[in-house]
Image: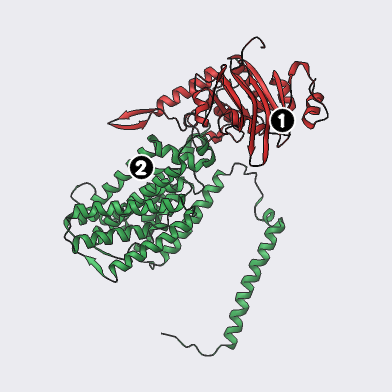
Amino acid sequence: MASSETAIEQPSFSEKIEPYISFLGPMAMILAIILFMGVAEPARYFRVSNMTQILLDAALYMPMAMAMTFVITQRGIDLSIGSVAALSSIIMAFLIKQYGFPAWSAALIALCLGALMGLINGLVITKFKVPDLIGTLAMDLVYRGFALVIAKGLVLARFPDLITEIGRGQSLVFLPTPVVIGLITLAIGYFMLKSTHFGRYTISIGSNPEASEMTGIAVDRHRVYAYVLMGTMAALAGIMLTGKLNAIQATSAPYFNLHVIAAVVVGGTSLFGGRASIVGSLAGVLLLSMMINALVTLRIEFFWQSVASGVVIILSVALYTWLQKKDRDGSGGLAAALSNPDNRKLLKMTVWIMGALIVLSIISLILGGPANPSG
Amino acid sequence: MASQKPIIAMRGIVKRFGGVVALDNVDLDAYPGEVLAIVGDNGAGKSTLIKVLTGVYQPTEGSIKLDDKPFQMASHSDAIENGIDAVYQNLAIADHLTPAENLFLGAELTKSVAGFTALDNRRMKEEATRVLKDRLGVQLKSMDVATESLSGGQRQAVAIARAVRHDDLRVLVMDEPTAALGPQETARTLELIKVLKAQGLAIIVISHSLDDVFEVSDRIHVQRRGQCAGVVKTSETTNEEVLGMIVGTKTAA
């Protein structure tokens, strides 16, 4: 029998660390934050109470990051999770406060509602062939609208102990209850990814949808599964948020989607599909919580968090894309980039836009009258 | 070869798509331990022919016999169950999965863990290593890397291994197995084809490369405009003659 591959080489160093890069990346950034805060604000940042706070903040996003890892790995995206969380927990709150449902059954109903909303998302995407981005963005409006219709402007507050235990309980001594819940969901996610058909097909669908279809995998059914998981985990996050604040309103959880997507992408799960890392998603969630907590500790205005999250998404996607590019043939930096006529035209356009802004500002300052504040 | 009976015998196959006749009265025989090449211009009906053979399409007219018995396939899985499988040009490989995961994609081995059904990754890896080594003589430097990090020839081996994983595979159809490969990888893939032929498989190769066809095949089936322009023995023909049959300036002797 002809042996076509006789040489058995040892895998090189870069191949050895490749599986862990998704974890090492965020870990390096976490280390950077720790070092920076160690210099800037060690006393307030490294207090035990602050560390617990970081973990509590992170816990809220762990279940969603787990589910979003599956969705993104399948080349999908879910922008509706904030509204799913809000709507399912608003309904839970009404069931408890107005109809006297026991907390446990109301919470389970909320999880089922989340699963149902995820199912609707999945069906909209696979059956009506609405692209993920548009489909979940539109469903986001629908779910948020329902939450507003049901709750009006009400803030529902003061929930039974079970709910607050889920959101901020300490009865497990070593770790806050929500952190334990979050870590358990991540562990289940890890197992599902490695050792179930759903996990295996999630990667194959994201890696090569046509090949998966040809292999006989029910591509659409497994995509729906991912959205159902996502909806359920978003509802769980809604319950955790309700318990954490001991209050819920229709406008709660506005930025869940971008925060969770940022955490997952920072953790090395590829937006182009096929590359998943649950451990990376955990690292991503921790990184974002540490970063936002650092901004708060440094007394930087809340609205900068939005800027920071956006920048982190762009940087990590760009970084991973660059790392995965196999043919980095040393394109020669700025000079080489400028010798490309397309880049020169883009530069010219940039100069024009900046110039127009400056000229318009100068003209306005010269011609403008005294300022007339609207407030 | 002539003394043996064909595994598959297709007779008078016609396939119409609406008014378009993609296959017009085509015969095809596949013998064990033989490589049959199918050549022809684009649109000559090569792909349609193998899709009928692998159960993806159902013929409009004509009959297929498996081991001399009438045989009908309702789907591709019918073909696989009866020992007929195909390796497609675009390789049907998920780049981010390991070779073993690709080998068993869609047919994973499972085990029971505390009442749950879980994938048996260890056994799949062992089996995959065995299939690659024993059936194809291929040993990868690592079974734990993503398939995307393998060379084109190794990826081809993984795709082929997926088909030959079934011990009862008897007919293997390969669509353009060397199309995307460099010269060295092409040589290795042709080597794989010879290895499988020696194991008694009937192999049907679609190719545009006449060099590869002459290197590896025993018979050449030429398709032209939906019809069979002739079947010739590779040892008794020349490159020019086959080319002439493809473009229609020559007919089979």
Relative to B181, residue A354 above or below: below
The amino acid type found where label 2 is placed reads: Gly
| Residue B223, horizontal then vertical, whole percent | 72, 29
| Residue A93, horizontal then vertical, whole percent | 23, 61
The number of numbered badges drawn on the structure is 2
| Residue A154, horizontal then vertical, whole percent | 26, 70
Q: Is residue A140 left or right of residue A46?
A: right
Q: Residues within 10 Å of mark 2 (few under 14, many from 20)?
A: many
Asked which quadrant contains residue A146, the reply is bottom left
The amino acid type found where label 1 is placed reads: Gln
Asked which quadrant contains residue A196, the reply is top left
Q: Quadrant of the C terminus of chain A?
A: bottom left
Q: Residue at x 54, y 90 (%)?
A: A369
Q: Colour of chain B?
A: red
Q: Is residue B86 left or right of residue B35?
A: left
Q: Residues within 10 Å of mark 1 (few under 14, many from 20)?
A: many
In the picture as drawn, the residue positioned furthest to the bottom comes out as A369
Q: Give the label, 2 or 1, closer to the camera.
A: 1
Q: Which residue is mark 1?
A: B227
> Marks 2 and 1, Cα distance to the nearest angstrom?
54 Å
- Chain holding disc 1: B
**Chain letter, green in picture:** A
Q: Residue at x 46, y 60 (%)?
A: A310
Q: Secondary structure at mark 2?
A: helix
Q: Which residue is mark 2?
A: A189
